[in-house]
Amino acid sequence: PGLAVYDPGFTNTASTRSAVTYIDGDKGILEYRGYPIEQLAEKSTYLEVAYLLIHGELPTREQHDKWVHEITFHTFVHENLKSQLQGFRYDAHPMGMLLSSVGALSTFYPEARNISDPQVRHDQVVRLIAKMPTLGAWSFRHAQGKPYVYPDNELTYTENFLSMLFKMSEQKYNPDPRLAKALEVLFILHADHEQNCSTNAVRSVGSSQVDPYSAVSAGIAALYGPLHGGANEAVLKMLKRIKVPENIPAFIEGVKKGDEKLMGFGHRVYKNFDPRATIIKKAVDDVFEVTGVNPLLEIAQELERIALEDDYFVSRKLYPNVDFYSGLIYEALQFPPEMFTVLFAIPRTSGWLAQWIELVDDKEQKIARPKQIYTGDRQLTFPSAEERW
Ligand code: CMC
């Protein structure tokens, strides 16, 4: 009390204690609940990782099957919410649709406000993880003027998402398992990343003890911003602008002069490599085996090769981050750029909820209310309108 430290963006202030995700940026380590991201991406599934994040430990077989069953059978959304989505303009941004429909979910489940009841919390966690792909896929279909596809509960989480996105006839949609697996890996990589901007938003709003739908919609709003969720879209735009590998040296010179940034390079925390980028690079090959190679891949690879040999990038410890390759995969899967952030929001929901539960359970947490350093005027005398005009 009485002491105010000026720390814009909280770069030096820990806002919470957390046991969810560990990052060592110098060593390129990312762990969820102590398990290295490389092992989770290789051996686990997104829903198992979501269980791990939320419950703090791996499920037994029984717990796993119950968890998957519960999530699978909450994938449908109320028809009135479907009508709300249909009321959006034809060119509505899918993130705007997602954030408002997740906020609207709180009105469908008013009991969600009773956050002190662990069963109530569990029910909303299941509903949110289950319904995010449905809402995300429907916002995608909306932009295309196509009918919304209902969930197919015989499919896995990522297969069902692909079905709701791309199904074109009454016949059952059978996604290529390699694409479903690649999406599973991308979902695992994006599930949590400790106190990033959107997680901080979820915690900050959640500290008012609002329901989790409202808190998560605040997270989606934070992710909507270009400095957080939009970098992979910027990478694609950059690659398209470079067009052919012959243009790379001139582009790099421009970056070094400070004309622009090499998008998809550098990270606030990771200063040697981003472990997620290494895993994504492998997924690129799997996806392109199915979809055919995106011609922009050649430019990306050449750009990476040149940058990693250039003293400007080496001396500043600038390496490819998770966004350098993810946009290429999403484009190969035929997602328009506006959908890229939705593909981030869906898996990040489990991380947001894990952190929200930790917040609600933590008796030391208080309502978020940062101090300020006041820089305005004081003690002025208010002049009447006659005196001013
Ligand atoms: N291209 C060229 N120069 C760069 C880049 C880049 N991508 N990133 C940093 N630098 C330079 C920067 O100009 C500075 O140079 P100098 O010391 O001469 O002034 C030096 O490297 C240090 O950079 P910084 O801005 O202090 O680093 P930061 O930790 O504040 O910024 C960053 C991290 C991710 C915002 C930044 O690297 C960047 O803007 N990268 C491009 C955008 C991008 O790919 N963002 C996705 C981040 S990963 C997503 C996630 O984890 O959620």
Image (cartoon, grey):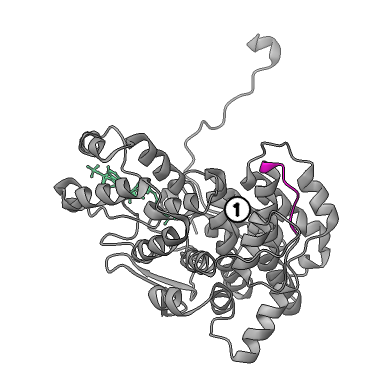
Magenta segment boundaries in residue numbering: 143-149
At a point 42% along the width and 39% down the height, the residue shown is: 237
> Compared with residue 382, is residue 368 higher up or lower down, i.e. above or below?
below
The answer, for residue 308, to whether it is visible in the render is yes
Residue 343 falls in image quadrant: bottom right
Query: What residue is shown at x 39% (from left), y 53% (from top)?
Result: 293
Front residue of this view, candidates 227 and 48: 48
Q: Nearer the viewer, residue 39 or 386?
A: 39
Q: Is residue 235 above or below residue 363?
A: above
Residue plotted at (60% across, 63% down): 349
Q: Residue 196 in the image: state x and y as whole percent.
A: 47, 58
**How many badges with numbers are in the image?**
1
Q: Up-down: is 166 above or below 338? A: below
Please provide percent x and percent y for residue 150: 76, 60
Q: Specify few, some or many for label 1: CA neighbours under 10 Å numbering under 14, 14-19, or 20 or more.
A: many
* Mark 1 lies on residue: 220
Residue sitting nearer the eye, 296 or 61: 296
Q: Amino acid at mark 1?
A: Ile
